[in-house]
Image (tube, rainbow, N blue to C red):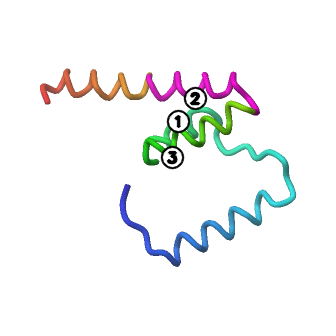
Amino acid sequence: MRQVEQLVLEIVEKEFEQCVSNQDYVNVGGVDTVAEVLRYVKYGMVDNIMGNLEQDDPELVVAIKTKMRIVKNMRYLNKLNKGE
């Protein structure tokens, strides 16, 4: 992931908090989006996120992990196909 200035992150965080502050759940793209975002997060942090999420919704965790494996496998197959 590219580096982002701290100020930009603070602005995005503030806007996001305002969007979700009065809602219990927010639709931000579903399992596909979560799996894609988690690709950019450190592995230990992914485990922590998934562990906390699993307490509330184990089925969702399975769906996210499945999607992450599918994307990882597709990228691997693409590299093989290209001869990388």
Q: Are marks 3 and 1 in contact (CB under 8 Å)?
A: no
Q: Mark 1: which amino acid?
A: Ala
Q: Is residue 59 magenta?
A: yes
> Which disc is residue 77 wearing?
none
Question: How many angstroms separate mark 2 from mark 3 (CA)?
Answer: 15 Å
Question: Residue at position x 44%, y 74% from top?
Answer: 5
Q: Position of residue 74 (x, y in %)?
A: 35, 24
Q: Quadrant of residue 64?
A: top right
The residue sitting at the left extreme is 83
Q: Mark 2: which amino acid?
A: Ile
Looking at the rendered image, the disc whose residue lies closer to the viewer, 3 or 1, is 3
Q: Which residues are magenta?
A: 56-69
Please name the residue that numbered disc 2 is placed on: 64
Q: Please name whichever residue, 69 or 46, is drawn nearer the observer in this view of the structure.
A: 46
Q: Position of residue 39 (x, y in %)?
A: 44, 41
Residue 22, placed above or below residue 60: below
Question: Residue at position x 36%, y 22% from top?
Answer: 73
Labels 3 and 1: the sequence-earlier one: 1
Q: Secondary structure at mark 2?
A: helix
Question: How many angstroms separate mark 1 from mark 2 (CA)?
Answer: 6 Å
Q: Please name whichever residue, 77 or 68, is drawn nearer the observer in this view of the structure.
A: 68
Left or right of 3: which side holds 76? left
Residue 80, placed above or below residue 15: above
Please name the residue that numbered disc 3 is placed on: 45
